[in-house]
Amino acid sequence: MAEGKSIDINIKSKHYLHVMAEALQKGFALAMWRLPNANEKQVLICEEPVTVEPETPFEEFEKGFVIAPFLPGSKKIFLKADGYWSSTLNEPELSPSFSQKFSSHNNDEKEIDASTFRWHIQHQHISVSHQPYQHVVEKAIRFIESGKAEKIVPSRTQYIETKIDLLQSFDALCAKYPSAMVSLISTPATGTWLGATPELLVAVENDQFFKTVALAGTKPYLPGTDLKSVAWTQKEIEEQALVERYIIQCLKKIRLREYEEFGPKTIVAGNLLHLKSEFTVDMKATNFPQLGSVMLQLLHPTSAVCGMPLSASLDFLNKEEGYNRGLYSGYLGPVKLKDQTQLFVNLRCLQVHKNGIQLYAGAGVTADSDPQKEYEETEMKMATLLKVIVA
């Protein structure tokens, strides 16, 4: 990490910085995030993260933060909110027993910089596919043409040897991408990940309103572009329609017809444009209090990050992708905080290693795909972070 650089991420009291640093030094887990179109930045500390079965309803969780990997059936990690604060609070909210574990309140005048933070770093072998991405896309196209799938979303990863100032980079991502869910998580089990994702997976507000989105299609965004005049190709329109149909199929599986659909419309996500549709349900009107968890089980992994149908696409990716995605294209987000649960697909993200970072990106492949253009799309998505991170 960069040494000697002061930290300022625009939260009122610097006391929380000392608590964060000491928590990481003690080996605790940490999650920091900024929700889309919000100014508030939130931080959570957990002394002992717990693993939970994938089918465990989040309605049964306490207040906290959940992290899940890409592979369906994998266990989730839940971070209980032992300590929590935000930019609207002057001081952290720590339980009495948890607060006693910290001496930071006596050391708030001590200088603190990036080197003070002992982020969790996994020292596993860096997993990188040895097969050129274009070759994987070519195989995906042939697989689709054979009738075994309608869409496949192969991804790739790139390791770059570099130093990164995580807190400054988090702040820079918040400033650059106001409509993204910006997150920084660090746990002993997952290591440390930074991301700015545009894609909501599941949200539940006030135990009443459920929401999910269909997001697909990608174009570069040029500042000043009139969104109403953006022209999408048939391939991109069909790609987004497949994600919509996937959501509707999930709703039909549970015999739920009382939903509202808005879109698709063109939206800006960082340096990219996407097509987006929103689906909402009144859970009280439909008498479906656990709709959030039920739909989470049905939706993840969505056709936007895996393919359609799910089983065939997943089999193809397990065979051809050539590396372990880990948390990339899994999901993460706050649970029951401020009467909201908001879980996002972990896209536009990177994992921190001892001497570098590992970036991840994928592209939706259909029968009309061009391998070189899909590769260029992954480059654009990786640039979302590369252009902003602070060394």
Image (spheres, helix red, strand yellow):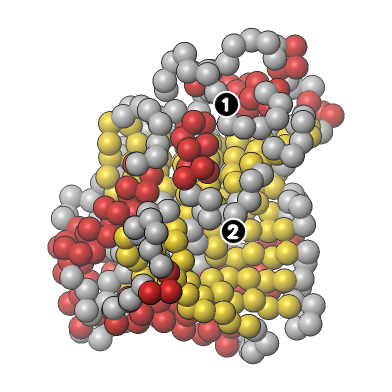
Observer-nearest of 186 and 85: 85
Type of amino acid under label 1:
Asp
Observer-nearest of 269 and 25: 269
Q: Is 315 placed left or right of 204 in the picture?
A: left
Position of the C terminus, as image quadrant, is top left
- Looking at the picture, does residue 106 appear above or below residue 352? above
Determine the secondary structure under disc 1.
loop
Q: Is 165 placed left or right of 363 in the picture?
A: right
Q: Residue at x 73, y 64 (%)?
A: 205
Q: Is residue 136 visible?
A: no
Residue 181 image position (x, y, % from top left): 54, 52
Q: Write down the quadrant of residue 207 in the picture.
A: bottom right
Observer-nearest of 371 and 109: 109
Q: Write down the quadrant of residue 318 in the picture.
A: bottom left
Q: Is 102 placed left or right of 23 in the picture?
A: right
Q: Residue at x 27, y 36 (%)?
A: 160
Q: Residue at x 60, y 23 (%)?
A: 21
Category of crowding for the residue at label 2, using alpha-carbon neighbours closer than 10 angstroms: few (below 14), some (14–19), many (at least 20): many
For disc 1, the marked residue is 8
For disc 2, the marked residue is 343
Q: CA distance from mark 2 to mark 1?
A: 27 Å
Q: Is residue 30 visible?
A: yes
Residue 266 image position (x, y, % from top left): 44, 71
Category of crowding for the residue at label 1, using alpha-carbon neighbours closer than 10 angstroms: few (below 14), some (14–19), many (at least 20): few
